[in-house]
Image (spheres, rainbow, N blue to C red):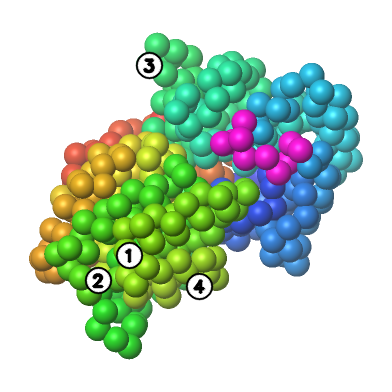
Amino acid sequence: MKNKLTPSHKLRIMYVDHTAKLGGGEIALRNLLGALDLTYIEPVLLSFEEGPLVDQLRDTVEVHVVALKDSVASASRESLGFASILKVRELVAMARHTLRVSQLMRHLDVDLIHTNSLKSDIIGGLAGRLAGRPVIWHVRDRIAPDYLPATVVRIFRALSRVIPSFVITVSQAVLTTISPAEEKDLLQPSRAAVVYDGLSEAALAEGSAYLEARISADSIRRIGLIGRICNWKGQHIFIQAAAIVHKSFPDVQFEIIGAPLFGEEEYEASLRLLCSTLNLNHVVTFAGFVTDVPRRVAELEIVVHASTIGEPFGLVIIEAMAQGKPIVATRGGGVPEIVIDGVTGLLVSMNDAQAMAHAIVSLLQDSELGKQMGRQGRSRVERTFTLEQTARGIESIYRRLLKRDPLQTAVVIDDYGTNDRTGSDGLGSIL
């Protein structure tokens, strides 16, 4: 690749994440670390806790763990845990942790800090600045009041102007929330870029094996929703839609694939109660956490995305599209940047079980339409959402940032009228 890094020595890049649990951001980070050009980059992972991410990478990547206070590290954004690091009782612990991290960065002689989560943006970002290193924030959350506490939104937007040297976001929707239309300062090529997460060659090859074929031994038609069980992921909307679809297609089965991650067991219990109330226990299955998600997706005829607030991106959607699955998804956040309505799937309003059910029924009634959308979706993933594009794009940002070269971009309109932006150095999607 012409756009690979070409320094005289390997660049030691420290990747910082506050959690080692395998959420979407951590899976994306793991995939990125496996796709980097190790001829020129020497990755170093810093986690604020032990866990699966650390365990999976320890044999292939230099790993360090500096434990963060449990009350900060384990709290979810829904419980306002992120805001807690800004409370007076947490400031001393946070300051001490930041100093320890900064000392480690200097000791390990890293060239650049790449943070991967909101908490690591703040703590790792401050530590990086104290260590005199450039800092990249990789923002995977929408910085908006419907997604985070309003106070956190204001503080994060303000800090985005002073802590990071550069900001990478997973979608245009995320970048827009960091720098709204009335605040133009961050929307500059020298300060921020959109780089989509993507699928590896192995994942694409696996998707090809499943394309237009279901591996289930029976003839049951299955519709599934994949993702962490939590209120904003909309499993309750999916169940309500299932009740409507069930009236017209009583033999169709519905699967909820995923498990609660941050103490959301009470919500899962409410979902099971909803199924009982709607007499759906015989057609709705809770699969729980599964290790082989592609195989479960292969058994589905339609994949549903039901988030009730704007999703920052939607990696599970492109995973399903890679297998040629038609998508029914809620219209919000970064999802319309992935799903082309009427071409690769159907977009519906958020919190609208009736609209979701109608979209599902239309695909059940016209299987050929669903297959056609699946083929278009697969093609779109191959064009726009590959891990190769992700890794090369991020490496290009490293090179430009460390050399202080300006970023130059061009805007390309794709076949369906959406704005895919491709940088002159191969960034998958860049502003």
Near-viewer residue (171 or 200)? 171
Element carrying mark 1:
loop
Residues at marks 1 and 2, CA–CA distance in whole angstroms: 11 Å
Where is residue 288 drawn, in percent x and y? 51, 66
**For residue 181, which numbered disc appears in the image?**
3
Element carrying mark 4:
loop
Residue named by callout 1: 280
| Mark 1 or 2: the one toward you | 1
Residues at marks 2 and 3, CA–CA distance in whole angstroms: 44 Å
User: Which region shows up in magenta?
Assistant: 71-80
User: Is residue 399 placed above or below 6 in the rendered structure?
Assistant: above
Where is residue 22 drawn, in percent x and y? 61, 56
Near-viewer residue (35 or 346)? 346
Element carrying mark 3:
loop
Q: Is residue 88 left or right of residue 219?
A: right
Q: Is residue 300 visible?
A: no
Residues at circles 1 and 3 in contact by the CB criterion of under 8 Å: no
Give the residue furthest to the top. 182
Residue named by callout 2: 252
Residue 77 covered by magenta stretch? yes
| Mark 1 or 4: the one toward you | 1
